[in-house]
Image: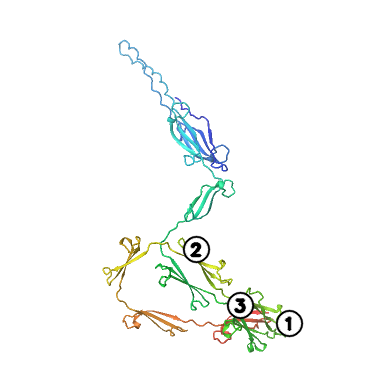
Amino acid sequence: MSRSRLLLTTASTLALLVAPACDSSPGLTTLVSTSLIPPGAACPTGGVRISTGVDRDYDGLLEPGEVQSTSHVCHGADGHDGADGVDGTDGVDGTDGVDGTDGVDGADGADGHDGADGSNAAVRVTPIAPEPGGTCWFGGVLVEVGTDLDGDGSLDEHEITDSEPLCAIHVNDQLTLIEQSLEPPGANCEHGGIAYVVGYDADGDQVLDPEEAGAPGYVCNQLTVIHGTSTLLDVTEATGNQCAFGGYVLRSGPDTDADGALASAEVVDTQVVCNGGDGLSSAVLMVDAGDQCGEDGGFIVSSGLDADGDGALDASEVQTSGLVCNGHDGFLGYDGKTSLVRLLDANGACGAMEGFILQTGLDDDDDGLLEPAEVDDQQVICDGFDGFDSLVAMYDDSSVCPYGGVRVDSGLDTDGDGVLDAGEVDHQAWLCDGYDGYNSLVAVSDADDICTYGGVRVETGLDTDEDGSLDPGEVQHEAYVCDGHDGYNSLVEVTDASSVCPYGGIRVETGLDRDHDGYLSYSEVEHEAYVCDGHDGFNSLVEVTDAWSCAEGGVVISVGLDTDEDGWLDAAEVQSETTLCY
């Protein structure tokens, strides 16, 4: 008996170099390695182990860490033992006599010849050319296995029992780049869109050069046309009640009757754009403090806005008021210093507006002048800015409105030239005309069969055959407007609510006139609400007094609200105090 012979008697490696997809991006080599398998669990009679993988370290050897798949091709089993040979011819019988002992059996015939050896296993590896979209995009090998039945040492087509393509992989070492840009309306995109190209960055400069770019693709905008009526805009001057300093009223809506004019019944939106008012100048008034500062004297400094523009701060214009007293004689022979106040021109501190600088401090050198080194506090009081006029400009803008329309720009006339410049536009809106469509028709018929108290059937649709009548096939919507049962009139009654509102107000009662007498009686009131007046606010006051707690002297600055409206900050009205020691 003999064991079948192996076609490949030594371990070998087959290397397949796959052509790269781009000259600058080399592919990795796919390797096939074969080795003997001794008889065992994998192959009872031994065989061949076929390992495949990618040569990632480019050393031409398929190392264990590079193996991606392993297959076994096992030898066939040993042939059966040949049949036993024919028994030899029996010997001649002896003379009959007394039966003797039985003769010895003849010897067994010789063994028959061994059966023919089993056929060897065979493997055939054939390169596969690169074929994008085919079996292997980047090429590879076709591994075919079977039994060498005719013993010629090669695997013929009829001897193949299994085959498997092993495809090479391509590693893209470069970046795949995508560039996109706006595509104007045209042959590629009827309504415009985005154009994009994709390609490999072969030279690694992170720029998609023309020779690297593939065919362009497009993501196009979709235009949905909604048939409707034109939108109209009406601009009129605002009344004094609407805008104290002038302005415009913008009314817009669909031209439902297609007469080119915006009727009051067609207005769906109204906007009032008002000019800003002129700013008010700041004013300061200083008066002698009288006995409020005792025998040392001082000033009452009041400030506010010159609302009537007469250049003087009237009592009703005072917003803040503070008491600035002369220093008190100090203890241990130290004379108190006189408090001084000086007004200076703002000199640009208020930018383009006018104003002044209010400086306060103590006359340390007793020369009666507030010198820079003696200034303890400084306030910049600026005039308010004049308000700008509001402007509205309208332009034809067919680029945004496919069927015509206007762009409405609005903003403030910051340069005062009466023209709304591009840099002055704060808001933009487009009022687009609708596409000319079919006329909408309404048909009204009696609906007493549906409505208990009478009513009408309202049918609407488009006059698609343009014959001026709404045919049954043109009806798109149908609604019933039924008369209701006679109801009650709604009444509203307004009465004084001083008993509920501490500072005055009104009570608003609503309900239905169920007894039809024209008056809202107590039993008919369904809702009640109170609208109360708010309390008048109090003036803020500031008071400056000597700080007896300071060893070298100082001041206490008290702040509060003049709740009793007597013009003085009483102890109970003080909300916060700050002590400043010299």
Res 574 visible:
no
Residue drawn at 41 percent across, 65 percent down: 229
Query: Dot 1 lies on which element?
Result: loop
Q: Amino acid at mark 3?
A: Asp
Q: Amino acid at mark 1?
A: Asp
500 in relation to 106, above or below? below
Residue drawn at 50 percent across, 82 percent down: 535
* Residue 175 picture location, percent across and down: 55, 48
**Residue named by callout 3:** 383
Residue 496 vs residue 12, the one in the foreground = 496
Q: Is residue 146 left or right of residue 318?
A: left
- The span from disc 1 to disc 3 (Cα, nearest Å) is 34 Å
Disc 1 or 2, which lies upstream in sequence?
Answer: 1
Disc 3 or 2, which lies upstream in sequence?
Answer: 3
Question: Badge 1, how many Cα within 10 Å: few under 14, some, many 20+?
Answer: few
Q: Amino acid at mark 2?
A: Asp
Query: Dot 2 lies on which element?
Result: loop
Residue drawn at 60 percent across, 79 percent down: 281
- The image's colouring method is rainbow
**Residue named by callout 1:** 365
- The span from disc 3 to disc 2 (Cα, nearest Å) is 42 Å
Which-is-in-front pick, marks 3 and 2? 2
Q: Is residue 110 left or right of residue 472?
A: right
